Amino acid sequence: MTFIDCIRQTLILSWLPLGMAVVESLPARSETISADLTFSLACKEAVEGVSNERWSAFLAQRGFAVLDKVRLARERGQKALLPRDLVALDAQDRMIEVLQLPIGSRDQQLWLRSPPPTQHDEDLEAALISFASEAPGCRVVEIARHENEASLWSLHESLATMAKGWFRSSKGI
């Protein structure tokens, strides 16, 4: 299991205490789906980076619905496992996740996924990097772009369905 797979499993399991069971189980495959774009926002020790509110406003301006899973956990009186955990979804089932791992770091990670086969949205990718780069005391590092074949469409659809379930469940607050 890769480091990213461990993070993914942790994130999926982090919803179980919230009573948000996975809508559909992810297919049991040896295949993995990569994000179209990934990067880290490395911030100095005392710097927050981009706030959840700023990320949410930026993504909403680009047509994404945004769910702050940490805020949702707090509103339900439950403990969040991560200090930052946003998921955004648009009408094209493109997903953006912004995370901060609880390892004593202020760094944020961003993943953008689109339905396979990968068709990079260069404008969106550039806008995400530019927006993150504007955070005082932070810099964008470890930028990577990946491709997914059409055969991975159902795996992406399972992830999008799971995210849609989180959004539906959050409406009951």
Image (spheres, grey):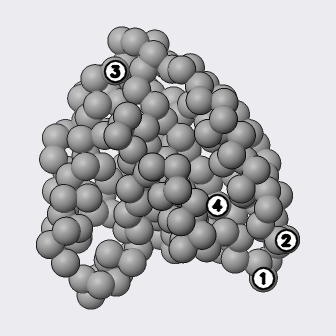
Image quarter of residue 14: bottom left
The residue that label 3 is drawn on is 153
Q: Which residue is mark 2?
A: 137
What is the CA distance from the residue labelled 3 to the residue labelled 2? 38 Å
Q: Could you classify mark 2 by the number of other residues whose Cα lies within 10 Å: few (under 14), some (14-19), or many (20 or more)?
A: some
Q: Nearer the viewer, residue 38 or 51?
A: 51
Counting residues from the N terminus, which is met first, the one under dot 3 or under dot 4?
4
CA distance separating discs 3 and 4: 27 Å
Please say if the residues under marks 1 and 4 sit with CB atoms less than 8 Å apart.
Answer: no
Crowding at mark 1 (Cα within 10 Å: few <14, some 14-19, many 20+): few
Which secondary structure, mark 2? loop
Looking at numbered disc 1 in the image, what kind of residue is underneath it? Ala
Q: Picture coordinates of residue 167 (x, y %)?
A: 26, 58
Mark closer to the chain start, 4 or 2: 4
Q: Secondary structure at mark 4?
A: strand
* Relative horizontal placement of residue 153, taking residue 143 as reference (left or right): left
* Residue 172 coordinates in the image, percent (x, y): 14, 72
| Left or right relative to 151: residue 125 | right
Q: Would residue 168 be found to the left or right of residue 95 on screen? A: left
Q: Quadrant of residue 105?
A: bottom right
Residue 70 seen in render: yes
Find out whether the residues at labels 2 and 1 contact each other: C-beta distance under 8 Å. yes
Earlier-in-chain disc, 2 versus 1: 1
Residue at image coords 38%, 56%: 65
Q: Earlier in the sequence, mark 3 or mark 2?
A: 2
Residue 10 visible, this angle:
no
Q: Depth-wise, is mark 2 or mark 1 nearer the camera?
A: 2
Residue appearing at x 59%, y 29% in the figure: 121
